[in-house]
Image: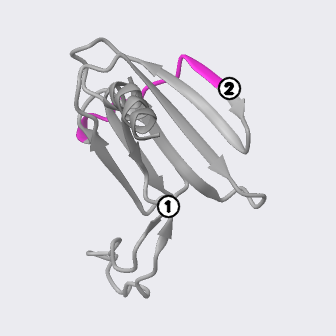
Amino acid sequence: MKRAIIALALAVAPALASAQQESCPLILPEGAVVVARPPSGWSPGPKTQVHLSGAGMMSSQPEGMQYLVPRVDKKAKGGERTTFEFQPNDEKWLWCDYGPAAQIAKRIQGAWTKCELTTKRDRHRTFTEVKATCK
């Protein structure tokens, strides 16, 4: 039994090391989005949490706004699976959108050439998962 567990761990370890996963936070906490300079005569409203409304991949830092069009878009159980292809030296960024309030992005390190973006939603069309897996 012990040998079987060790053999399984050795077999699975290379597969786990051959991919990177990043997920969008489903909610930005209260206070994460602040109206710093409202128009003259206006006051900012209460600070509330903000829910995820979309996601995708970029090929440069967020300031460059180089949003990518997926190569393949498929329906998956409870959501969709979208595929983005890269050259080994391309920058890869996962962006997460929170309506007009905010957008965050995280660089995915490595010479990965393909990233799959998996999204899942509940019956109210609210995101329950957004995950990028790059290989």
Q: Identity of the amino acid at label 2?
A: Lys
Residue 55 visible in rendering:
no
Residue 73 marker: none
Q: Identity of the amino acid at label 1?
A: Leu
Estimate the x, y position of residue 51 in percent, counting from the top left. 52, 65
Residue 107 visible in rendering:
yes
Q: Which residue is mark 1?
A: 26
Magenta span of residues: 63-73
Q: Residue furthest top?
A: 87
Q: Is residue 71 magenta?
A: yes
Estimate the x, y position of residue 83 in percent, counting from the top left. 52, 23
The overriding secondary structure of the stretch rendered in magenta is: loop
Task: Characterize the local packing of mark 1: few (<14), some (14-19) or many (20 or more) Cα atoms within 10 angstroms.
Answer: some
Name the quarter where the C terminus is drawn: top left
Q: Which residue is mark 2?
A: 74
Location of residue 133 by image quarter: top left
SS at circle 2: strand
Q: Nearer the viewer, residue 74 or 20?
A: 20
Location of residue 18 by image quarter: top left
Q: Earlier in the sequence, mark 2 or mark 1?
A: 1
> Distance between the Cα atoms at labels 2 and 1?
22 Å
Up-down: is 135 above or below 101?
Answer: above
Estimate the x, y position of residue 123 in percent, counting from the top left. 78, 58
Up-down: is 103 above or below 117?
Answer: below
What residue sits 35% from the left and 86% below the top? 41
